[in-house]
Image (cartoon, rainbow, N blue to C red):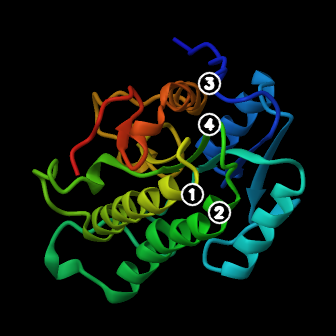
């Protein structure tokens, strides 16, 4: 069953919402949902090919995109919906003997370093007063405490690195903007190009629209004391 659009009335009215990676399945669904919701004066999305260009492997493009987005109004909500699991000749490793330095470097570049540079440029632009949120999509398999199966080295490790970066950045953000929130979110298994090849039989796979609504509901319910946290699409805390 599709979720209804969250009101997002925990945010001050107006301002700008920015979706990083709006060309992907979840990113596009988030951008559409935010546009329909009407809480924000502007809803913008970045893509590799305009109108707001952003390449996670190019810090100059990150800085330029954030500056451009901020010209439309104060940034109240920024969601990083990017991620890398497979592609470019790489697939998740099943054993140590499959480890490859280039694969590890690529996973870290997209899943940890890119989002870290996003935080570098986004967090200083979040308003000092009133609710503002930076949320990045992590993954439950990035949890060290919840790892009981092994495998998927590059993806697990890069998402675990992302979680630590979020936690660390949230501490610095709190000093500057006590009402701002920086979190990692696990969207669950969603019917997108990233996860579909690995969806197991019997596993619940949700449409991007439903995942977007659920993530926005979690974001709407976040409070300042949640900053630095790691939550799933139900709003439940995930072990580090």
Query: Nearer the observer, disc 1 or disc 2?
Result: 1
Q: Which residue is mark 3?
A: 10
Residue name at image x 65 percent, y 63 percent = 124
Q: Which residue is mark 4?
A: 131
Query: Nearer the observer, disc 1 or disc 4?
Result: 1
Specify which label sits upstream in the sequence, 2 or 4.
2
Mark 1 to mark 2: distance in Å?
Answer: 8 Å
Badge 3 marks a residue whose secondary structure is loop
Q: Tell me residue 120's x, y (percent).
A: 59, 70
Q: Tell me residue 235's x, y (percent).
A: 38, 28
Mark 1 to mark 4: distance in Å?
Answer: 13 Å
Q: Residues within 10 Å of mark 2 (few under 14, many from 20)?
A: few
Q: Is residue 193 visible?
A: yes
Mark 2 to mark 4: distance in Å?
Answer: 14 Å
Badge 4 marks a residue whose secondary structure is loop
Of residues 121 and 196, the one drawn nearer to the viewer in this rendering = 121
Q: Which residue is mark 2?
A: 124
Q: Residues within 10 Å of mark 3 (few under 14, many from 20)?
A: some
Mark 3 to mark 2: distance in Å?
Answer: 21 Å
Q: Is residue 9 above or below residue 155?
A: above
Mark 1 to mark 3: distance in Å?
Answer: 20 Å
Q: Tell me residue 110's x, y (percent).
A: 51, 70
Q: Is residue 49 visible?
A: no
Residue name at image x 80 percent, y 39 percent = 15
Specify which label sits upstream in the sequence, 3 or 2.
3
Mark 4 to mark 3: distance in Å?
Answer: 7 Å
Label 1–label 2 contact, CB within 8 A: yes
Of residues 219 and 140, the one drawn nearer to the viewer in this rendering = 219
Q: Tell me residue 41's x, y (percent).
A: 86, 34
Q: Which residue is mark 1?
A: 176
Label 3–label 2 contact, CB within 8 A: no
Specify which label sits upstream in the sequence, 1 or 4.
4
């Amino acid at each position: 069953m599709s979720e209804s659009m969250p009101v997002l009335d925990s945010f001050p009215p107006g301002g700008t919402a920015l979706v990083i990676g709006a060309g992907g399945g979840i990113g596009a669904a988030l951008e559409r949902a935010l546009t329909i919701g009407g809480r924000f004066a502007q809803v913008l999305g970045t893509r590799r090919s305009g109108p707001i260009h952003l390449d996670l492997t190019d810090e100059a493009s990150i800085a330029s995109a954030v500056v451009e987005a901020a010209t439309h109004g104060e940034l109240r909500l920024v969601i990083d919906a990017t991620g890398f699991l497979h592609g470019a000749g790489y697939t998740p490793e099943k054993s140590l003997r499959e480890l490859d330095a280039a694969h590890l470097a690529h996973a870290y570049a997209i899943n940890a370093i890119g989002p870290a540079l996003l935080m570098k440029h986004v967090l200083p632009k979040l308003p000092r007063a009133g609710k503002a949120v930076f949320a990045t999509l992590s993954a439950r398999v990035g949890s060290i405490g919840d790892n009981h199966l092994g495998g998927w080295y590059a993806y697990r490790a890069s998402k675990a690195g992302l979680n630590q970066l979020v936690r660390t950045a949230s501490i610095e953000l709190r000093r500057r903007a006590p009402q701002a929130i920086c979190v990692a979110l696990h969207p669950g298994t969603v019917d997108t190009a990233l996860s579909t090849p690995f969806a197991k039989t019997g596993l619940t796979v949700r449409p991007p629209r439903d995942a977007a609504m659920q993530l926005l509901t979690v974001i709407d319910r976040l409070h300042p004391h949640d900053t630095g946290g790691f939550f799933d699409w139900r709003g439940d805390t995930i072990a580090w």
